[in-house]
């Protein structure tokens, strides 16, 4: 009997919540099509869904406070997406290196900012499914 070891390992790793390299997958990213692993450290402090898209804002106490944002695309097609972070009273606008924008098939981000303890962080998510159908989401998190 021939057994496809790769498929078996993938199935076991997906059920267990771990990738083949041993890294822990995000609890909502369990499918074999989810190629993103834990690109953002910490705990989720904000998340949302819009059709085939999901976004997550994470916080970790490391490095004087670290926030990280990522947007997932499960539509199966490249879509124009933007994700960015701004530290209030530090960063003036959504600019690199704290932003990621382009036509992405799987995700935009994980964009990180550090030294966020005691500061407010703005996260902006923009998703353009088509010219007349877009989302512009802004979230303010203070800590």
Image (cartoon, rainbow, N blue to C red):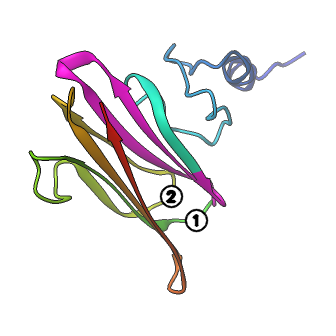
- Residue found 56% across the figure and 19% down from its top: 20
Residue 6, by quadrant, is top right
Residue 115, by quadrant, is top left
Mark 2: few, some, or many residues within 10 Å (few <14, many ≥20)? some
Residue 24 x, y percent position in the rendering: 53, 18
Residue 90, by quadrant, is top left
Horizontal relation, residue 29 to residue 127: left or right = right
**Residue 120 visible in the current orientation:** yes
Q: What predominant SS class does the magenta segment belong to?
A: strand
Instruction: Tell me if residue 54 is in the magenta stretch.
Output: yes
- Residue found 33% across the figure and 36% down from its top: 68
Q: Which residue is mark 1?
A: 77
**Compared with residue 128, is residue 104 higher up or lower down, i.e. above or below?**
above
Residue 23 x, y percent position in the rendering: 49, 17
Residue 131 x, y percent position in the rendering: 50, 85
- Residue found 36% across the figure and 28% down from its top: 59
- Residue found 73% across the figure and 26% down from its top: 7
Instruction: Check whether the beta carbons of the residues at disc 2 and disc 1 lie within 8 A of each other.
Output: yes
Q: Which residue is mark 2?
A: 105
Mark 1: few, some, or many residues within 10 Å (few <14, many ≥20)? few
Q: CA distance from mark 2 to mark 1?
A: 5 Å
The secondary element bearing badge 2 is classed as: loop
The residue range painted magenta reads 49-75
């Amino acid at each position: 009997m021939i057994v496809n070891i790769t498929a078996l390992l993938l199935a076991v790793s997906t059920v267990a919540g771990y990738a083949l390299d041993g890294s822990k997958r995000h609890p909502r990213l369990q499918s074999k099509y989810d190629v993103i692993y834990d690109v953002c450290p910490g705990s989720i402090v904000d998340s949302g869904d819009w059709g085939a898209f999901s976004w997550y804002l994470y916080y970790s106490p490391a490095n004087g406070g670290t926030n990280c944002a990522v947007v997932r695309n499960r539509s199966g097609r490249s879509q124009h997406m933007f994700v960015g972070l701004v530290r209030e009273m530090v960063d003036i606008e959504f600019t690199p290196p704290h932003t990621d924008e382009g036509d992405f098939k799987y995700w935009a981000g994980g964009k990180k900012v550090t030294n966020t303890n005691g500061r407010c962080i703005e996260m902006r998510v923009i998703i353009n499914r088509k010219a007349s159908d877009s989302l512009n989401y802004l979230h303010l998190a203070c800590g």
